[in-house]
Image: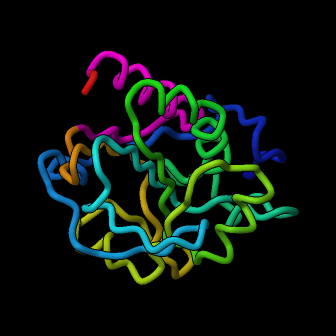
C-alpha cells in the first residue's frame, strides 16, 4: 500500500519504527574526516564545521510521479516521510539558525544529482549531503536498512558541537515533526 501523496500522509496508517538501539553509540562520537559533496557544490567535512550544526538523515526522497521505491514502501517502518521531513527542516531553517544551529544539513545515500533536483524542486535553503559511497555511514556505523538492493539510512537527526555529536534523535516518527523536535531541543539547550 502506497499513499497517493508525498506530503499529505496519514501517519496512523504507517508502522512507526522502533528503537533498535542502532544509534545508541553516536552521542559523544566525533565526526570522521570525510568529505561529502553538498548540493550547493561544496565539499563538506562535518568535523570541520564550527559551532553547532544539525544533520538530519533520511532513506530517500520521493521522485516526482512515483511514491515509493517498492510496492510496500509505506509498510517498511521508517521508510515513508523523507519529503515531509525535509520540508519541515526547510520551513524551520531560520528558526533553527536563530536557536543556535550555525548550519543545517540533510544527508542521504542518494547521489548529489538526485538530491539537487529535490533541493531545487522543494526550494531547500541548505545543503543536502550525499553519502552514496557509504563512507560516513560505515565510519559512524549509522543505522541503515536494505531495500530493493540499496543501502539506505534510517531516519535520524544529529546535533553536533565543534564536530562532536552531542544529541541524537532516533527513531524519528512522524518525520514531519522532526524539525520542530530539534528546534525545541536547541531552544532548551543553548550553546
**Measured along the vertical axis of the image, is residue 86 above or below residue 47?**
above
Residue 22 image position (x, y, % from top left): 24, 54
The residue shown at (55%, 53%) is 79
Occupied quadrant, residue 9: top right
Image coordinates of residue 43 in percent, x first then y, are 45, 74
**Helix, strand or loop for the magenta stretch, by majority:** helix
Q: Position of residue 151 (x, y in %)?
A: 45, 74
Position of 155 compared to 162: left or right?
A: right
Q: 47 or 28: which is nearer to us?
A: 47
Q: Which residues are magenta?
A: 167-189
Please state, as top left, top right, bottom left or bottom right, where the C terminus lies in the image: top left
- Horizontal placement of 120 versus 33: left or right? right
Choose top left, top right, bottom left or bottom right for residue 112: bottom right
**Residue sitting at the far top:** 188
Q: Is residue 148 above or below residue 108?
A: below
Q: Quadrant of residue 57?
A: bottom left
Is 109 included in the stretch rendered in magenta?
Answer: no
- Residue shown at 36%/45% (left/top)? 53
146 lies above or below 172: below
Residue appearing at x 37%, y 64% in the figure: 144
Amino acid at each position: 500500500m502506497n499513499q497517493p501523496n508525498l506530503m499529505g500522509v496519514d501517519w496512523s496508517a504507517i508502522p512507526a519504527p522502533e528503537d533498535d538501539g542502532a544509534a545508541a553509540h553516536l552521542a559523544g562520537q566525533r565526526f570522521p574526516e570525510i568529505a561529502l559533496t553538498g548540493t550547493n557544490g561544496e565539499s563538506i567535512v562535518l568535523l570541520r564545521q564550527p559551532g553547532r550544526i544539525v544533520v538530519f538523515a533520511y532513506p530517500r526522497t520521493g521522485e516526482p510521479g512515483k511514491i515509493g521505491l517498492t510496492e510496500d514502501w509505506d509498510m517498511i517502518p521508517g521508510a515513508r516521510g523523507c519529503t515531509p521531513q525535509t520540508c519541515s527542516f526547510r520551513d524551520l531553517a531560520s528558526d533553527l539558525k536563530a536557536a543556535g544551529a550555525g548550519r543545517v544539513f540533510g544527508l542521504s545515500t542518494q547521489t548529489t544529482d538526485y538530491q539537487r533536483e529535490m533541493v531545487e524542486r522543494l526550494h531547500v535553503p541548505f545543503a543536502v549531503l550525499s553519502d552514496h559511497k557509504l563512507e560516513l555511514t560505515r565510519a559512524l556505523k549509522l543505522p541503515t536498512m536494505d531495500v530493493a538492493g540499496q543501502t539506505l539510512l534510517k531516519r535520524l537527526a544529529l546535533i553536533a558541537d565543534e564536530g562532536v555529536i552531542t544529541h541524537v534523535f532516533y527513531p524519528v516518527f512522524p518525520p514531519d515533526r522532526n524539525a520542530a523536535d530539534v528546534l525545541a531541543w536547541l531552544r532548551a539547550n543553548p550553546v
